[in-house]
């Protein structure tokens, strides 16, 4: 029975995984194509990405609530709720996207207060100012994508995401290095290529949902005052906000760790960017498995089948753990090769290789905690998991990171080791929580 569930999760997950990888690919591509400009440029990408990633993931996680809500309404055959979920989800996406652009753009003027190397801050500011503009199209795309995936319509967002990869590479080639008569814009050129790619993705996805044969019946182009439903807005926010806080606790911990690393110098920060890029690739696979598990749990709960929800959850957890274990072996074996794809600086490569060894050690825990968050969201259990994640990162990982890097002088490796401990704590607590809320007492 569990083998069948694994198969169903894989069938749902693989297009989601590729879609997630297409999103993180834009950051990886930027890092690889900026790497030849030097360690300072790669460090600037790390600083910019760390600051951008926190609000981005928190905002996107609000939209994760749409998939289980959509799958439950679809399982119950409730077309009216589906239309309200789509439209009110997009209202939230639009509002949050505008809010973040309006606040993050002027906040880039405060980057000099972070105590980072001056040359890194000078490179980071123009890059981040442009990338911030992509927040609105990202939010719109994510809202439409989560609704589509909740209906098990996986391929449109996947195809769009895959198309964006070669377009972004071509845009980087034109704008970073000034080919075909374009001015060489360096890092800022990469930012414009990424922002334009994300904007195009949102426009195409709007067209798919508005005119697609299975999606146009939800009336994306037919808006009335009654479409604004307070109860639906609140339900999305009540499910999405605690999950957003969970991701805030994790991503802000990693971003604060990047700031700690930046104080150690641009070489350490460049190595951190390479290692976190590689770890984010494997992490996105677990996020895809998490999304598939949440959809299946939403369907099971729509039928009132708690046992099926539990079986789905543990199948997703073991599947993610197995995959991430393989990734750990790959990171260990190719720890010197992967950094060489980004940069030829021997010192950066050696530090990045040591960080990849630590990443290899925490892969399984990272996969379990990523899936655990999604499974509990599918169960609409979000308050206690938020507390667990806060405990794991802010009471364990970050104090330990400061201790290992400053008191014991373990540097960037100490910070990464502390993050690994936080991931392990989060994975354990979330797994226990899922077992407890799905366990039927005899």
Image (cartoon, grey):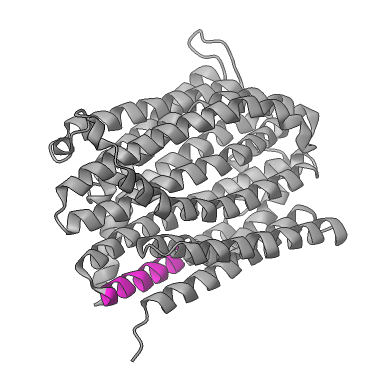
Question: Could you say which quadrant of the image residue 35 lies in?
Answer: top right
Residue 359, position as x, y percentages in the image? 61, 59
Q: Quick one: 209 or 25, which is closer to the camera? A: 209
- Tell me what residue is drawn at x 49 percent, y 76 percent: 432
Q: Horizontal placement of 428 versus 205: left or right?
A: right
- Tell me what residue is drawn at x 27 percent, y 56 percent: 12
Q: Is residue 69 above or below residue 266?
A: below
Q: Is residue 161 visible?
A: no
Q: Is residue 302 above or below residue 145?
A: below
Quarter of the rendering occupied by the N terminus: bottom left
- Please give the range of residues in magenta: 306-323
Residue 160, position as x, y percentages in the image? 31, 35
- Direction top: furthest residue: 181
Q: Quick one: 289 or 83, which is closer to the camera? A: 83
Question: Could you say which quadrant of the image residue 109 lies in?
Answer: top right
Total numbered badges shown on the rendered structure? 0
- Tell me what residue is drawn at x 69 percent, y 48 percent: 256
Q: Horizontal placement of 148 versus 243: left or right?
A: left
Is residue 309 a member of the stretch shown in magenta? yes
Q: Quick one: 377 or 188, which is closer to the camera? A: 377
Is residue 156 a member of the stretch shown in magenta? no
Residue 279, position as x, y percentages in the image? 55, 52
Quarter of the rendering occupied by the C terminus: bottom left
Q: Is residue 56 above or below residue 107?
A: below
Residue 351, position as x, y percentages in the image? 72, 50
């Amino acid at each position: 029975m569990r083998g069948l569930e694994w198969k169903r999760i894989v069938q749902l997950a693989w297009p989601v995984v590729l879609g997630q990888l297409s999103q993180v690919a834009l950051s990886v591509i930027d890092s690889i194509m900026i790497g030849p400009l030097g360690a300072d440029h790669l460090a600037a990408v790390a600083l910019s990405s760390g600051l951008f990633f926190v609000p981005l993931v928190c905002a996107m996680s609000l939209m994760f609530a749409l998939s289980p809500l959509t799958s439950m309404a679809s399982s119950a055959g409730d077309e009216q709720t589906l239309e309200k979920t789509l439209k009110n989800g997009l209202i939230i996406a639009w509002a949050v996207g505008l809010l973040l652009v309006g606040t993050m753009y002027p906040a880039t003027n405060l980057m000099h207060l972070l105590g980072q190397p001056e040359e890194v801050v000078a490179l980071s500011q123009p890059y981040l100012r442009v990338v911030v503009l992509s927040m609105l199209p990202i939010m719109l795309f994510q809202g439409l994508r989560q609704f589509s995936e909740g209906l098990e319509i996986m391929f449109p967002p996947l195809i769009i995401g895959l198309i964006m990869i070669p377009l972004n590479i071509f845009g980087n080639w034109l704008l970073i290095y000034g080919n075909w008569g374009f001015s060489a814009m360096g890092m800022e050129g990469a930012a414009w290529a990424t922002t334009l790619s994300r904007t195009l993705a949102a426009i195409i996805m709007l067209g798919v949902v508005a005119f697609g044969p299975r999606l146009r019946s939800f009336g994306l182009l037919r808006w009335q005052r009654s479409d604004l439903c307070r109860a639906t807005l609140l339900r999305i926010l009540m499910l999405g906000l605690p999950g957003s806080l969970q991701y805030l606790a994790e991503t802000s911990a990693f971003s604060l760790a990047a700031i700690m690393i930046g104080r150690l110098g641009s070489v350490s920060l460049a190595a951190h960017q390479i290692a976190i890029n590689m770890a984010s690739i494997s992490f996105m696979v677990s996020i895809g498995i998490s999304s598939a598990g949440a959809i299946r749990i939403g369907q099971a709960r729509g039928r009132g089948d708690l046992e099926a929800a539990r079986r789905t959850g543990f199948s997703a957890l073991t599947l993610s753990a197995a995959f991430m274990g393989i990734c750990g072996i790959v990171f260990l074996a190719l720890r010197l090769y992967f950094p060489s794809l980004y940069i030829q600086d021997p010192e950066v490569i050696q530090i990045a290789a040591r960080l990849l060894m630590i990443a290899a050690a925490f892969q399984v825990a990272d996969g379990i905690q990523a899936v655990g968050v999604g499974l509990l969201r599918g169960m609409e259990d979000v308050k206690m998991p938020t507390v667990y994640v806060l405990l794991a990162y802010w009471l364990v990982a970050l104090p330990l990171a400061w201790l290992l890097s400053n008191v014991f002088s373990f540097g960037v490796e100490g910070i990464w080791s502390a993050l690994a401990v936080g991931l392990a704590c989060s994975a354990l607590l979330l797994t226990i929580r899922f077992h407890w809320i799905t366990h039927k007492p005899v």
